[in-house]
Amino acid sequence: MSSINRDNGYMVIDHRGTDGLPEDILAMVGLPRGAGRGMFEVATIYCVHCGGHTIKNPERLRPRGFCKKCNHYICDPCEAAKLAPDYVHRTIEELTILVQGGDYEIVGSSSAPVLIPRSNNG
């Protein structure tokens, strides 16, 4: 498996024992048509910037977001954030280490997090 695909996943939804879900519910949660009936299987793409997984749409025509710094595909919201002039490149793993160290907290969205220094005043 190539390095850019190493963290990708696979999602299975099994509705074979139920009546399934209506299409409007599927659309509301971002699932494609037909995912609420029978067995639905689809590949996912892991975003190293926010830590989320995105369903891989086989009908997608536009190119996927890609980060040359970490050699990995990224989700659409992180791709948009990457283009901002004040963007600072950090992976979810780097952000986790900074927050777990106790010196920072995160505000903002997962695709455009803002690190805020914590006060050390008790």
Image (cartoon, helix red, strand yellow):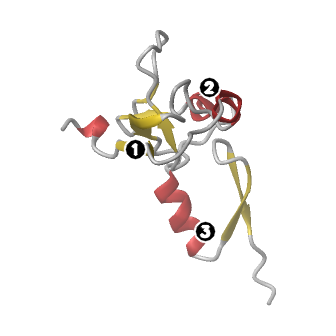
Q: In the depicted view, which residue is nearer to us: 60 or 35?
A: 35
Proximity of marks 3 and 1: CB atoms separated by less than 8 Å: no
Which amino acid, by three-letter code, is at mark 3? Answer: Val
Q: Earlier in the sequence, mark 3 or mark 2?
A: 2
Task: Give the labeled residue for mark 2.
Answer: 83
Proximity of marks 3 and 2: CB atoms separated by less than 8 Å: no
Residue positioned most to the bottom: 122
Task: Give the labeled residue for mark 1.
Answer: 12
Label 3 secondary element: helix
Mark number, residue 85: none
Rounded to the nearest angstrom, the CA distance separating label 3 from label 2 is 24 Å
Q: Earlier in the sequence, mark 3 or mark 1?
A: 1
Q: Residue at x 81, y 86 (%)?
A: 121
Which amino acid, by three-letter code, is at mark 2? Answer: Leu
Q: Residue at x 71, y 29 (%)?
A: 24
Rounded to the nearest angstrom, the CA distance separating label 3 from label 1 is 33 Å
Residue positioned most to the left: 1
Residue 73 percent location from the top left of the image:
41, 32
Task: Give the labeled residue for mark 3.
Answer: 99
Instruction: For label 1, count other residues whose C-alpha is less than 10 Å away and answer few (under 14), some (14-19) or many (20+).
Output: few
Label 2 secondary element: loop
Rounded to the nearest angstrom, the CA distance separating label 2 from label 1 is 33 Å
Which amino acid, by three-letter code, is at mark 1? Answer: Val
Residue 42 percent location from the top left of the image:
39, 34
Tell me the mark number nearer the camera, choosing from 2 and 1: 1
Could you tell whether 110 is left or right of 98 in the image?
right
Q: Earlier in the sequence, mark 2 or mark 1?
A: 1
